[in-house]
Amino acid sequence: MRGLSRRSFLRLGAVAAIPYQGEDPFDLLRRRWREVTVGPEPGAGGPYRTERAATAARYRDTMAPRDGSLWPDLAFPSFTETPARLQAMARAYAAEGDASLAEAVATGIDHYRRHVYAAGAAPAGNWWNWRIGTPRRLLDAAVLIGPHLTERRSAPLRDSVDHFLPACVLGDYSGTSTGANRVDQCTVMLLRAVLGADRDKAALAASALAPVFPYVDEGDGIYRDGSFIQHTTVPYQGGYGVVLLSGLATLFAVLRGTPWEVTDQNVFDAVERSFAPFVHDGFCMDLVSGRGIGRRPYGDHRRGHELAAAILLLGESASAAERARWQGMVKGWVRRAAHRPPLDPAERARLSAIMDDDAIPALAEPAGHRLQAMSARAVHRRPGWCAALSMASSTIGHYEHGNGENLRGWHTGSGLLYWWADGHGEQYSDSFWQTVDPYRLPGTTVSTLRLPDGAGGAWGDTCPQGRWVGGATDSMYAIVGQHLNGLESTMEAFKSWVFLDDAVVCMGAGISGGDGVPVETVVDNRRTDARLTVDRVAGWAHLEGHGGYVLPCARLRTSRERRTGGAATRGYVTLWIDHGVDPGSAGYLYLLMPGAGADATMARAADPAWARVLANTSRQQGVHVPSLGITAVNFWNAGAAGALSASAPCAVLVKERGDGTATVTVADPRRDLDELTVTWDRPVTEVLAGHPLLSAATTGPRLTLVWGRLAGAGGGSQTVTVRLGR
């Protein structure tokens, strides 16, 4: 458990005690809250004003307080919808100034407080409703309507919040008060402070944010490699991460200029290191969205727009250079977005401001590779396509389910390989999770053993025992691997991916199982009705308008089907390899070429020398691609593959450049090496750029690199640059 340091409390407490000159701080907080959540002035929101006002008027006119409800169509307790309607009415009042709305909100808040959110009431159901969701919306509404909520009604609401979120909850950083939850609780505490003009609670709301800012090495929070984890084992930039970033952006903006002002550079750095890598053409990828991936169609686009709005708001507290980069990045996202979900007026206003400003350039997608080893996630970008990889490890769960959501996400951590070529921004958005076969997710190797809904522990408690998960990247290319253990099955596999300019080399070895059912590797499962062509003699397949595959087609099986889930029916084309029932040591090798045409696919299949397989076993997997100067090997065990050898399990990526130099990148995916020796059987004359963890280097007919304690590097990649000999 991590409590707040005494120094943190004293520092912020001392600031709060300093006599404050100028505008009353609570007047400033109320004004800033309105600006951030509603708009800078009454009438803000442009064309969305009419829509907002009409919705609020409908809520006002249909509100009918009774013992069992506030609106006839929402029976109590209605923890989400009833407070949300009061919040919407309050925001419309703050934007338009219609006093009848404020009076209705005051009546509704008091009614809900007396019948549901009363101090001493038994907090039935999810704790989140009582400490975060309900008080956040009620307090938001109360602050926005100001004096329309009289002291007679305000005091009991404050008492209720104090009962369900006492100050002691923020005194310990553990359990359900970490990461995004802590930011939410600090927001509730700040609104509670504003409602009662309580300086002590305002200081507590600011000081209790302190544990959120430092990088973490385990559990919830932001890691140095950009990973963001919530619920201990779930990568969550697209869910709780959006909440955290949006909440911090709001608090930074609202507290600016008050005695409790707070910012943190780690949070600013996280925008481009943690969040942006998982946004592609306006949507936030599902592999960092936990149990929320199947919540609604196009949920990834909704999360992307929410993240964009949060980044723009955070930019108001960042440096001018950061703000400019973020605005250009977000503008590029919105320009390329295939789907634009509805946003609240304040979010839309921020997006509209940069879209209408010709001085802000729309930045293109950056090329490169981002591997977040601590969360077992990777993203690879090249002009015209993007791929992302989701894995499970001893510290990252196969999937998360909870509150009845994502009950069949069993295999989303079994090497799920997402990819998008131009025009494919809706591939996993348009009812994919509602209709896809959950046993045949693209890129995965799975036992076809039937699993019950919600198999494994809830809330991400589904970690396998495999520790070798991660890889090596030089920020442009990468080799990534996963020692895969199936969820609630005996299936085991060693999977590797080499990410290149126009292709991903996919390798599998040591595939075994004893469940009495077939084990399959799913080459792809595309939501499409496009034409599939398979040339079994030449060894390639092509999906029209999507991409190509190079593989020994004698083992390839295909199907075309229409699948229904809920109200949606979608077509799928599936390509898979059947390893048979209870395989002993099966394997596979194929090349994925996103966006490639049939001619390019055929040409690659006709050029077997393009990539030479160095090894594909449960001891090593690797390839050499001469045209790119790339040699990449995953060493599951010490040994040799081609010109590379390693003294212990590791990942190695070599890139020979055209200027007579090369880079050698190594990583310790298991995060347990005190020493590692890597040898490259290639003449090298000198080491041009070393690394702090490089303890010795020998050049000459071959290069030998001795690395120190890689265990403390969090699975991160370490690179040296050398000059090649003849």
Image (tube, rainbow, N blue to C red):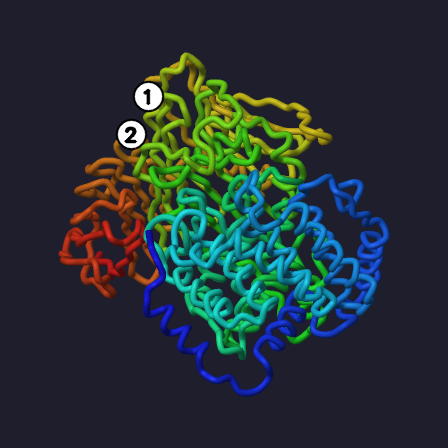
CB atoms of marks 1 and 2 within 8 Å: yes
Q: Secondary structure at mark 2?
A: loop
Horizontal relation, residue 256 to residue 5: left or right: right
Estimate the spatial distance between the alpha carbons at disc 1 and disc 2, rounded to whole Å. Answer: 9 Å
Which class describes the residues within 10 Å of circle 2: few (<14), some (14-19), or many (20+)?
A: many
Quadrant in the picture for residue 37: bottom right
Tag 1's secondary structure?
loop
The residue closer to the viewer here, 112 or 189, is 112
Q: Residues within 10 Å of mark 1 (few under 14, many from 20)?
A: some
Q: Position of residue 648 (x, y in %)?
A: 19, 41
Q: Residue at x 31, y 53 (%)?
A: 717
Q: Earlier in the sequence, mark 1 or mark 2?
A: 1
- For badge 1, the amino acid type reads Ser
Residue at (56, 36) in percent of width and height: 403
Nearest the viewer among 490 and 424 is 490
Residue 523 in the image: state x and y as whole percent.
50, 30
Give residue 411's position: percent from left, percent from top. Answer: 48, 31
Residues 115 and 11: in front is 115
Q: Position of residue 360 (x, y in %)?
A: 63, 72
From the image, tell me which residue sits under label 1: 585
Residue 319 drawn above or below residue 390: below
Please name whichever residue, 195 or 296, is drawn nearer the observer in this view of the structure.
195
